[in-house]
Each structure stands twice: as structure tokens, then as C-alpha cells.
Image (cartoon, coloured by chain):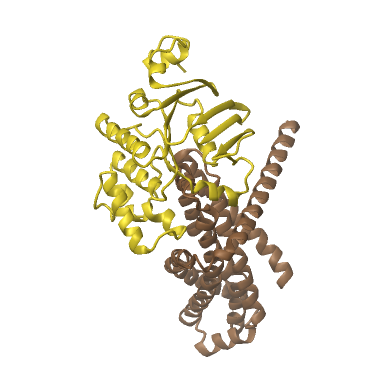
Chain colours: A brown, B yellow
Amino acid sequence: MWQRAIGFTGGFVLDMVEVSGGLFLLIGRILKQSRMLMRDRKLLLEQMLLIGVNSLPLVFVIAIFTGAVSAWQAAYQFEGKISLSLLGSAVSTAIFIELGPVLTAIILAGRVGASIAAELGTMKVTEQIDALESLAINPVRYLAMPRFFAAMAMTPILTIFADFIAIFGSYLVSYVLLDLTTHMFFDSVQEAFTLRSVFGGLLKAFVFGAIISAVGCYIGFRTMGGAEGVGRATIQAFVLSSTLILMNDYILATIVF
Amino acid sequence: MIEIRNLKKSFNGKAVLRNIDLDIPKSQSHIIIGRSGSGKSVLLKHIIGLIRPEGGQIFVDGEEICGLSNHDLYRVRRKFGMLFQGAALFDSMTVEANIALGVREHRMFSESEIKKLVAERLEMVGLPGIQNMRPAELSGGMKKRVGLARALMMNPEFVLFDEPTTGLDPIMADAINDLIIYCTKQLRVTSIVVTHDMVSAYKVGDLISMLHDGEMIFTGTPDEVRHTTNPVVKQFVEGKAEGPLQIY
């Protein structure tokens, strides 16, 4: 029994070491190709459109409901203890430093990271990546680099968008259901507003963008085994990037705040 | 010329290529036959540097490629074109973008020259005017011919064909065979064809080698293959179930 447990733990640790090593190697190879970024700006813009602009509707829906529920639950916790006039401060700080960047990143891990893994995984199992190599085109430069930089650029932008939509959602709940005036709510938001909260949140978003795209590309490039392998790669990309997002969220929070 | 010396490769401890030695002369059609899973495609991918060997050497025009850096390997690869088994066309691109990708990325020609060249290559493979179609709209034979047009776009010295006739009807298979002959005789490229289709091997091959259990057990002209006394080669080319080759 204990031998199995040791074997399982050892296997898990070895897998983690292999994945971490592979991820760092891939990021190194992407950064090495970054001198070609200007030349490949068309590929970069295409990816920014796919990753960023096309994610706006989903980010909008999730952000507005997150903001709304945050306001409602904060009001529930404040009941009889803290004045509701502080609701805007509490909710907006939580949104800027935590909910905005983390929820946006988790949405993108599902929508973008899994889709990158599925797309590159399909290209791998149908020999399209070998075909690129046969044309003397480096797949890291052509496929991974634009996705990596596009995700790093678009995740903070989507996070700013999510922050404002979520605050709007919490304002709607405060105004319509909790009888707070517009003035009272936004005065409270303004009181707690610091550039440190906003930029701390954006730093997190920047790192999360790198994680999402690097994991998607890494898992996609090592996909094997036909349609089943592509399905597995999609799940692995989501699970691994979500885990890394939450781990790095903690690390960055202890450093920045 | 391509020279392969003592090439070795294994996957998960199973030897796929054992001490392969092979010379592929210029401007000829060299066919590599063998059963499914015998390592033919793995050998082809070693020749273009898509797989690195565990031992041995491959010389392309006298330059050893197994020890090259990625940068130098990309330089050598520009001498090659490859037609993949499933054509490996890029789903997200039109036929024109597929064929032109290599020359566009390497900035070999102007846009107007590229459009003219794509039209010429499509005409050559018998598919004029399909530039704007998508791979999903093409039949298996059309995909292979578009794949060949893409492989020929950078004017390669060597073209590698991985099972070019597999999955095609006999008429389309013969059309592909004629294109391989055209590449070798008219364009003077060196064709290396991996196949288990003996009709194709006899028709297009100047030399035929057989790979069995990771070893190159025979090399000869099509006539020598027809009259071989080697029981393994004989059983394979005659397509008989009974003999030294076991069914697995």
C-alpha cells in the first residue's frame, strides 16, 4: 500500500518537474523568437482579435454577475455591523485586486487556453506541425510566439474591462435593491481607489496571460493519439493553467499587497 | 545525394531502425517498401530532420545533418519538399495560402510572382483555378495533389513522399504516380517514396529498398525485386499471407 503511495507521489513529482521544465524551455524559445515580433505583426494582430475581442461578450456576462453577487453578499455580511455606505469600497477593492484578474484569467483559460491546446494538438496529430517544419518554418515562431504575446497584451485589457463592468454590476444591485444612492456608492469606490490596487491587479493579469498561452501551446505541441489525445489535451490545458493561475495569484498577492 | 550510415532509432525501448545504411543517388526515384509499422515513415522523417536519431549519420549533399543546430537544419530543409500521408494541409487556410506559405514566409518572391507560381503549380498537378477553395472542400486525391504543389513550390532538390497513393482509387493513384515520375524526369528532383503499394513502386521506382524489422534487407532495381529469391521480399511483393512474414 505505502509502496503504491510512494510510487504515485514520485510519479506526480516527476510529471511536475517535466511539465515545469518543458514550460520554461518553451517560454525561453518563444522569447528567443521575439525579435521576429514586428515582422509577424499580422499574426499577432489576428491572435489579439481572437483572444481579446472575441472574449469580450463572455467577459461582460461573467463580470456583471460577479459584481452583482459581490455587492449582494457584501451587504449580507455588513448587515447590522458595518454601514452600507462602505459597500463601494469593499466591493471595488476586491474586484480590482482579486476578482477582476482571477476571474478573467479563469475564463480565458477555458476559452482561449483550451482552444489553443485543441488547435495546436489537432495540427500536431494531423502532421500540420511537421508540414510547417518541412517548409523550414519554425512552429514556435509561427504558432506559439503570436499567441503568447497576444495573450499577455489582451489579458490586462480584458481585466480592465471586467473591473469596470463588475463595478457597474455591483452599482446596479446597490442602487436598485439596496437603496444606495449613486453618489454614496461611487464616493465609497473613490475613497478606496488606489493605483496600487489597479496596477497590482494588472500585473497579475499580465502573468496569467503568459501562463494561459504558454500552457496551451506546450500541451498542444506535445499532443499524441488522434481525436482522443486532442480531447485530453484540452482538459489538461484548462486544469494546468487554472492551477498555475491560482498558485501564482497567491505568490503575487504576497509580493504586491 | 543522400547517404545514410548506421542509423539507429528506438521508441520506448523498441528498436524501430537498426543500423540502416542507404545511398540515394541524385535525380532518381528511390522507393522504400515495407509492412505497416516497419519504420518507413520514421526513416523519411529522419532524412528531413523531423526526428533526431540515437546513432548514425545522414549526409545531404555531403553535409551531415544529425548534429546540426536548429538554425542550420532549417537551412538544409529548404532543399526538401515533403508530401505527407494525409497531405497535412493547413485547415485554416485557402489552397493558395497553403501552397504559398513557404515562399511567403521566406520572402522568396513578390506577391505577383507568388500568385503566378501558385497558378502554375496547380496547373501542373491538374487542379487549375482552385486557389480559393479550403482543404475541407477537397477530395483525398485533390488534397494530395495540393500537398504536392506545396512541396514543389520552393523548387526543392529532394521530394519525400509518405504513402502517396494510400487511400486513393486506382485511377487517382496512377495520376499521382505520373506526377512523381514527372517530378523526377522533368523537374530533375530526387524522389524518395515510402509505400507498400507495389504497383506504384514498380511504376515510379528506379531503385527499390525493403525495410523489415528495422533493417534494410534488400536494395535493387524493379526487375531485381521481381526476380528476387529472398523469401521475405518475395512474399511481400507478391502480397501472400503465407510465408516467413507473420500476420500480426
Please determine whether, in this image, residue B106 is positioned above or below residue B33.
below
Please determine whether, in this image, residue A6 is positioned above or below residue B129.
above
Please determine whether, in this image, residue A229 is positioned above or below residue B223.
below
Towards the viewer: A198 or A23? A23
Please determine whether, in this image, residue A242 is positioned above or below residue A167.
above
- Position of B74 with respect to A251 (left or right) is left
For the N terminus of chain A, the quadrant is: top right
Residue A131 seen in the figure: yes
- Position of B80 with respect to B145 (left or right) is right
**In the image, residue A16 lies at what x, y percent?**
67, 47
Towards the viewer: B70 or A37? B70
For the C terminus of chain A, the quadrant is: bottom right
Residue at x 55%, y 85% (from the top left corner): A185
- Position of A225 with respect to B164 (left or right) is right
**In the image, residue A168 lies at what x, y percent?**
49, 79
**In the image, residue A39 lies at what x, y percent?**
50, 66
Please tell me how many numbered marks the rendered image carries: 0
Residue at x 28%, y 41% (from the top left corner): B139
Question: Would you identify the image quadrant in which residue A208 lies?
Answer: bottom right
Question: Would you identify the image quadrant in which residue A42 lies?
Answer: bottom left
Towards the viewer: B212 or A17? B212
Residue lying farthest bottom?
A183
Residue A80 seen in the figure: no
**In the image, residue B224 lies at what x, y percent?**
41, 17
